[in-house]
Structure formats: C-alpha cells, structure tokens
C-alpha cells in the first residue's frame, strides 16, 4: 500500500478544487434553504403544542432513515431524479430535526416569568417574539444551526452515489480502486471543512449571544 | 376604582372554580391586599383585572369601564404590573427594562432617559451606577426595586402587584415595604397587592381581602379584620398572636397620657411630695435645658426615700435615660423599649421635649378598648 498525500494532491489539484467547490455549494444551498424553511416553521410550532408534537415526530422519523436510503428514495421521485435536486432535498429533510427542535426548544425555554412580565406590560405577542423570545432563544437556536452545518457537510459526501461530483467521490472511488491516498484525502478534506466551519461558527456564536446573558457580577 | 362583580374563573379540567363569584371593590388611591393560603385564587383574581386571564363569568370594571371593552395589550399598557419573579429581561440593561412601557407609548428618547433616572432615584438606586447594568449584575432587592420602577414608568393610576417583595430576605423586605408605603403617601395609586403573608397584609393594606378556596371570606380594614375575625378560618389564618399583630396598627400617640409630673433639677429633693400633690405615679427628671433625662416612680421613692439623697435619686433616674419613645413610634417598638430597659413606663417625646408618659397598662388598655368596640 502506498500512501502519499502530497503526491496525490499535486497530481489532482484541479479535481480536488472542483470537488471541494461542488461540496461547498451543495452544503451552502442546503443550509440556506433549510434555514429559510425550518426556522419559521420552528417558530410557528411554538404557538401550537399539538402541531409541534406531530411535526417533531415526523422530523425524528426522517432523521432516522439511513442517509444512503434517503438519497435513493429521492432519486425514485420522477421530478427529482439523479443529481443536485435530490441531494438538496434529502439534506434539507435531514436538517429539519436539529433546526426545528432547537428553534422550538430555544424559544419555548425562555423564562416564563420574563414573558409573563412583558405580556403584562402590554407588549404584543409579535413584539415579545422579536424582542425577547428570539434573542433569548438565540444560543440554543445557534447551536442547532452549528449541528446542521457540520452534519450537512458530512452527509453531503454520500450524495456522490446519486451523481454529485463532490469530495465523497474520492472516498467512493478510492474504495472501488483500493486507493488509500484517495480515501484519506477525501475524508481529510471533509473533516477539515467541518471542523473549520464549526470553529468559525463557534466564534460567531460568542458574538450573537446577548450581552446581558454573558454579563456576571 | 376597580370593581369586581360576581367574578368566577373555572380552569378547564379543575373540579372547583379557582375564583368563585367574587365581589370586591378597590377604592381610588387605596392599597387593597388580597391575602390567603397558597392556591386560594389570589393571583388568578389579580390576573383577571389586566386580562392575563379571562374570567369565566362576572364583570370587572375600572372607573366604570368594563375591562373587556379594551384591547388587552392597550389595557395592560395602562396598568402597572409587578410579579414575584420580577421577570426583568436578562438581555436588556436596567434602563432598557424600565423603558419598556414608555417605548410602547412611543415617548421621545430624552423624556424616557429623564424618566428612567427619576424612577431609579425614587426607588433608592443610583442612576449612574445602575442604569447600564444588566439584571444579573444586581442583588435580589435591587432587582425587585427595578421591577417596581418598571411598573411605575408611565405613572399608571392603577398597579397590580403579585407578591412584589416575595423574592428577598425579611430585612430587605421590611425596608422595601416601608419605602413603598412612604412613596404611596405621595403617589396615591389604586393598588391591588397580593401576598400570602398576613403580616405584610396588615402592614400594607388600607383594606384586606382574606381569601379561602376561591371565595372572599372577609373584607375590611386591618383593624376590623384583627378585631373581629369573621370566622375560625380567618382566626386561624391570623394566628394565635392576633393581639400582638394588632399592636402594629397603633402608634404611641394613640395610647399615651399627656398629663405628666416634671421635676426641675432643684426639685429633685422633694420629688415625692410633688408627686403626691400631682397624684402622679411617675415623675420625669429634667436637666437645665428642659430635656428629660430619666424618671422616678412613686413606688421607688416610698421605699427608698430615707436611703437616698438628691444625687442618688439623680443616678437612679438616669438608669432610665433611654426609656423614651416618640409619639410616632409604633406600639410594638415602645413595648420593646420597655422590656429592653426593664421599665414600667416610657417617656413620650415630641421634637425632643417631654410630651407625656405611657405605661404598660396604657398599652393594654388601648388595645382592649379597641377590642371592645
Ligand atoms: N393555568 C391554570 N390551569 C389550571 N389550574 C390553574 C391554573 N392556574 C392556577 N390554577 C389553579 O387555580 C387555583 C388558584 O391558583 P392561583 O395561582 O390563583 O393561587 P394563589 O392564591 O395565587 O396561590 P399562591 O399563593 O401559591 O400563588 C390553584 O388551585 C391552581 O392550581
Ligand atoms: Mg399566586
């Protein structure tokens, strides 16, 4: 077995760049779409316990489907087929659980007394959501966002089996060809991206947490 | 004026109504305390007034207007609301917390800034130090003050206070109560005040409404309630020390006797004859400046006349140099002075001059005369 990552990198720089870029754009679009859909739905669910229970059960069920199977199921839907649309939809469905759950928990776990006092002073429920529940729920919501980003980066690799030309392809082909350098290169870059994104988001998280929650005597 | 008429609240799935056809009137400018054991419906009653809870039946009016005719948010903006858990927004500074309702009213910025400082001063907090702190940086007592300040921000004529001083230690609570009563003398708000502490109710209330299991058991002034408990429930709720609690309602000026025998420095030698002439049980020794510096009782003099010269009597009197109270001293405090100095009598002062005398018997007589009424 011959492992030479430097050599592999030098000979395949263009492919690596292409795959990395594809990986990135897939993750980015999946995360953006997920945020746009699931955050508002998570917020809405805080208004109805009945619907919250239903939707959360659905999200949990989807989350339990093995990723390869979910990608495969997407492909069988005529309107989607092989490729990016199926990959995107599967990733967005996976993000449902961590995002909805954390948005819901974040908002719901805001101190009831703070809400009671605000409501009692005549704040409208919209204003309470914007000025109190969202900012105070932000740490939990942001944690869900971080998990989603890291998770999506990992699962996106599997989309290579339904035609995505991304970093997962190194692992897939490496396995077929028993090329260890190739496998390790794929895994390494995916991990580096995931760790880098998580670290950056960790830094941002510190900035978005309301000051009063950090201030101590 | 707040009027509740036959107000009932039945929570779904509960066997009994939390509040059961309650009728109650809170006159303008008074503090009405709702008091009773846990779960008897005090908070529910309070929260129906600002429509945090909708009544199942009955009517609630404020100055003749049904609260149901008003938009709930608008109604609440006009009513100060303080809860036990305070509920300060942890991500907002103290100034921002106090500014919540003024902002809802869209007050101009400068007016809000001015009002915030004014309220902080009014609540005994230093604006410079407090303004830009976060709630987590304050002590429990300070937070409670901010909670009250926030409720008073737009100077609402009506305040609803649900155990507003519940979250602090007894000493801080006493302090907050005293300050609030002093403030209330000036601001004269119509206040509904919830507590489960009968002592707090007696102290804070112009009227006390005693609740038991959703029903109003007795309504009256603290004196009425303490003097004539409506039934055994109220008696038990007040406790075995009913009479002692009653003492807290009175000040020295209601119980003392103005007639008093005074001894100028040169008269101390014939103290006994002066007392006999004035039919006094006790005589106060004054110094050159007419300030009282102690007293002698007739009993003492009759026993010790032969044994003491003027100097000795002066010393004996001086042992009670601290047995003095003000006309505005509450009776329980006067009683502690008596016990502290082992004194049968206390001198009553007004503006530093001797005004009268009060004995243990006078206290007893005062309380029991009130009992009999
Ligand atoms: N949202 C609710 N749903 C059902 N029952 C409730 C609800 N809120 C209060 N209750 C019940 O109504 C009764 C009165 O409650 P309330 O909070 O008014 O009591 P309270 O006198 O304020 O008691 P405490 O001194 O403990 O605050 C209690 O038996 C309580 O369990
Ligand atoms: Mg209560």
Image (cartoon, grey):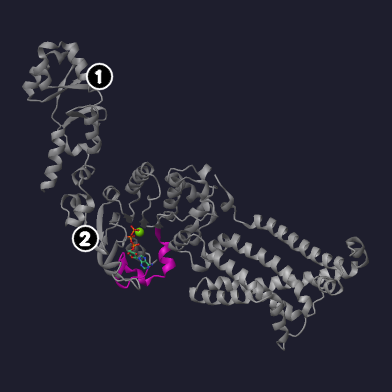
Residue A155 within the magenta-colored segment of the rendering: no
Chain on which label 1 sits? B
Vertical order, A56 against B235 (above or below):
below
Q: Quadrant of ligand 2?
A: bottom left
Neighbour tally class for label 1: few under 14, some 14-19, many 20 plus, Cα within 10 Å: few
Q: Which mark is residue B217?
A: 2
Is tag 2's residue or tag 1's residue first in the polypeptide sequence?
2
Q: Which mark is residue B289?
A: 1
Image quarter for residue B354? top left
Report the span colored magenta.
B53-80
* Apparent side of residue B115 relative to residue B258 in the rendered image (left or right): right
* Apparent side of residue B28 relative to residue A145 in the rendered image (left or right): left
Q: How many marks?
A: 2
Vertical order, B112 against B61 (above or below):
above
Q: Nearer the viewer, residue A69 or A115?
A: A69
> Label 1's element?
loop
Report the Cα–Cα distance between label 2 and label 1.
Answer: 55 Å
- At a point 24% along the width and 65% down the height, the residue shown is B23
Query: Percent position (x, y) of residue A90?
Result: 69, 77
- Between disc 2 and disc 1, the foreground one is 2
Q: Nearer the viewer, residue A51 or B35?
A: A51
Q: Nearer the viewer, residue B226 or A143?
A: A143
- At a point 55% along the width and 65% down the height, the residue shown is A105
Which residue sits furthest bottom?
A78
Residue B286 visible in the current orientation = no
């Amino acid at each position: 077995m011959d492992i030479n990552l430097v050599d592999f990198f030098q000979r395949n720089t263009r492919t690596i760049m292409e795959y990395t870029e594809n990986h990135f754009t897939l993750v980015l679009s999946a995360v953006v779409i997920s945020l746009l859909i699931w955050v508002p739905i998570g917020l809405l669910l805080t208004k109805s316990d009945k619907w919250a229970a239903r939707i959360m059960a659905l999200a949990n069920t989807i989350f339990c489907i093995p990723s390869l199977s979910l990608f495969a199921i997407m492909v069988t839907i005529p309107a989607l087929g092989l490729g990016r649309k199926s990959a995107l939809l599967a990733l967005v469905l996976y993000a449902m659980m961590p995002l909805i759950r954390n948005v819901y928990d974040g908002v719901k776990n805001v101190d009831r007394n703070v809400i009671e006092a605000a409501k009692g002073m005549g704040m409208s429920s919209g204003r309470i959501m914007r000025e109190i529940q969202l900012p105070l729920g932000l740490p939990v919501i942001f944690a869900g966002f971080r998990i989603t980003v890291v998770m999506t980066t990992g699962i996106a690799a599997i989309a290579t089996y339904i035609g995505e030309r991304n970093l997962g392809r190194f692992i897939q082909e490496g396995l077929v060809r028993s090329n260890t350098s190739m496998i390790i290169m794929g895994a390494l870059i995916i991990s580096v991206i995931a760790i880098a994104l998580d670290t950056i988001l960790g830094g941002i998280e510190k900035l978005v947490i309301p000051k009063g929650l950090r201030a101590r005597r | 004026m707040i009027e509740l008429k036959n107000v009932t609240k039945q929570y779904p799935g509960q066997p009994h109504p939390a509040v059961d056809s309650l009728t109650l009137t809170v006159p303008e400018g008074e503090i009405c305390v709702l008091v009773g054991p846990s779960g008897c419906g005090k908070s529910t009653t309070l929260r129906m007034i600002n429509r945090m809870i909708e009544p199942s039946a009955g009517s609630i009016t404020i100055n003749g207007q049904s609260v149901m005719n008003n938009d709930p948010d608008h109604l609440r903006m006009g009513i100060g609301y303080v809860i036990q858990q305070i509920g300060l927004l942890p991500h907002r500074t103290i100034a921002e917390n106090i500014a919540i309702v003024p902002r809802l009213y869209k007050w101009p910025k400068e007016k809000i800034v001015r009002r915030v400082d004014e309220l902080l001063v009014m609540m005994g907090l230093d604006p410079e130090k407090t303004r830009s702190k976060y709630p987590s940086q304050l002590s429990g007592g300070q937070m409670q003050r901010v909670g009250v300040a926030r409720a008073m921000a737009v100077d609402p004529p009506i305040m609803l206070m649900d155990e507003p001083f519940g979250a602090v230690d007894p000493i801080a609570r006493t302090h907050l109560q005293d300050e609030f009563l002093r403030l209330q003398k000036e601001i004269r708000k119509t206040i509904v005040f919830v507590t489960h502490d009968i002592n707090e109710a007696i102290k804070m209330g112009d009227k006390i409404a005693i609740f038991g299991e959703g029903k109003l058991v007795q309504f009256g002034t603290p004196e009425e309630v303490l003097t004539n408990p409506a039934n055994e429930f109220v008696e038990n709720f007040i406790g075995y020390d009913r009479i002692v609690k009653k003492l807290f309602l009175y000040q020295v000026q209601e119980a003392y006797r103005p007639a008093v025998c005074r001894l100028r420095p040169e008269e101390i030698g014939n103290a006994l004859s002066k007392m006999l002439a004035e039919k006094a049980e006790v005589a106060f020794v004054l110094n050159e400046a007419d300030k009282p510096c102690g007293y002698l009782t007739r009993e003492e003099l009759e026993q010790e006349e032969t044994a003491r010269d003027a100097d000795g009597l002066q010393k004996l009197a001086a042992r009670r140099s601290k047995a003095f109270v003000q006309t505005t001293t509450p009776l329980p405090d006067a009683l502690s002075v008596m016990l502290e100095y082992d004194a049968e009598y206390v001198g009553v002062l007004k503006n530093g001059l001797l005004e009268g005398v009060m004995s243990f018997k006078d206290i007893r007589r005062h309380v029991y005369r009130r009992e009999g009424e």
